């Protein structure tokens, strides 16, 4: 029985929202060793350059860096090793069919603790072109200006 209740966000991949259009999201478990879980609980995770792929009917996360646990010894694992994601077979088949389409990829969006267990939010994403990124930045700037003007007007 898990000790903690609720959701505690450990790491977010903000760069993914800048580089990709997120079409679909999926929550999945992740297979970790004990010292890796302790390091994740301390927040020593980097999702920035990570991606996921379907290999032989299993989903693996590559490029996710979990720093070695400082109090660990011989049980520490390679920080960049591939980590297996825990999904149902039907979910894996669905993801595989979505990724087969042109320009789609699996990107880890968020790593969090849910009721004491490490979970990952996986996104099915489509890459953005340079003009899409510029449009998104222009929209964000204009929204910021609108909110700033509304705040000033309410004072």
Image (spheres, rainbow, N blue to C red):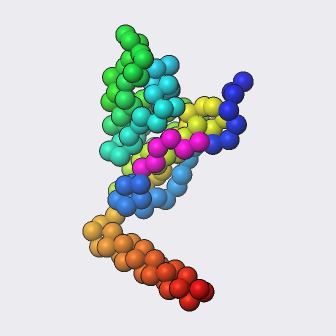
* Residue 106 coordinates in the image, percent (x, y): 42, 47
Q: Is residue 44 above or below residue 153?
A: above
Q: Nearer the viewer, residue 141 or 17?
A: 141
Q: Nearer the viewer, residue 154 or 33?
A: 154
**Image position of 87 (left or right of 142):** right
Q: Is residue 75 above or below residue 116?
A: above
**Picture mark count:** 0
For residue 12: magenta? yes
**Image position of 89 (left or right of 4):** left
Q: Main secondary structure of the magenta part?
A: strand
Residue drawn at x 39%, y 50% is 105
Q: Is residue 113 above or below residue 136?
A: above
Q: Is residue 125 above or below residue 82?
A: below
Instruction: State the quadrant of the C terminus.
Output: bottom right
* Residue 131 coordinates in the image, percent (x, y): 29, 73
For residue 9: magenta? yes
* Residue 76 coordinates in the image, percent (x, y): 38, 17
Residue at the outermost top position: 74
Which quarter of the figure has residue 130? bottom left
* Residue 37 coordinates in the image, percent (x, y): 50, 26
**Image position of 101 (left or right of 131):** right
Q: Which residues are magenta?
A: 8-13
Residue drawn at x 54%, y 44% is 9
Residue drawn at x 60%, y 86% is 154
Q: In this orientation, does residue 12 appear?
A: yes
Q: Nearer the viewer, residue 88 or 8?
A: 8
Residue at the outermost left position: 130
Instruction: State the quadrant of the N terminus.
Output: top right
Residue at the outermost bottom position: 153
Q: In this orientation, does residue 98 appear?
A: no
Q: Nearer the viewer, residue 38 or 86?
A: 38
């Amino acid at each position: 029985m898990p000790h903690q209740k609720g959701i505690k966000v450990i790491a977010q991949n903000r760069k993914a929202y800048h580089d990709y259009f997120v079409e679909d999201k999926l929550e999945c478990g992740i297979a970790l060793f004990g010292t890796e879980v302790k390091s994740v609980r301390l927040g020593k995770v980097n999702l920035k350059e990570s991606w996921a792929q379907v290999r032989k009917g299993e989903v693996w996360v590559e490029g996710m860096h979990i720093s070695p646990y400082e109090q660990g010894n011989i049980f520490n694992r390679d920080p960049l090793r591939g980590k297996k994601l825990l999904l149902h077979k039907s979910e894996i088949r669905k993801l595989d069919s979505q990724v087969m389409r042109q320009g789609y990829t699996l990107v880890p969006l968020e790593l969090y603790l849910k009721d004491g267990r490490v979970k990952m939010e996986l996104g099915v994403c489509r890459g953005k072109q340079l003009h899409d990124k510029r449009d998104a930045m222009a929209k964000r700037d204009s929204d910021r200006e609108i909110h700033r003007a509304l705040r000033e007007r309410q004072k």
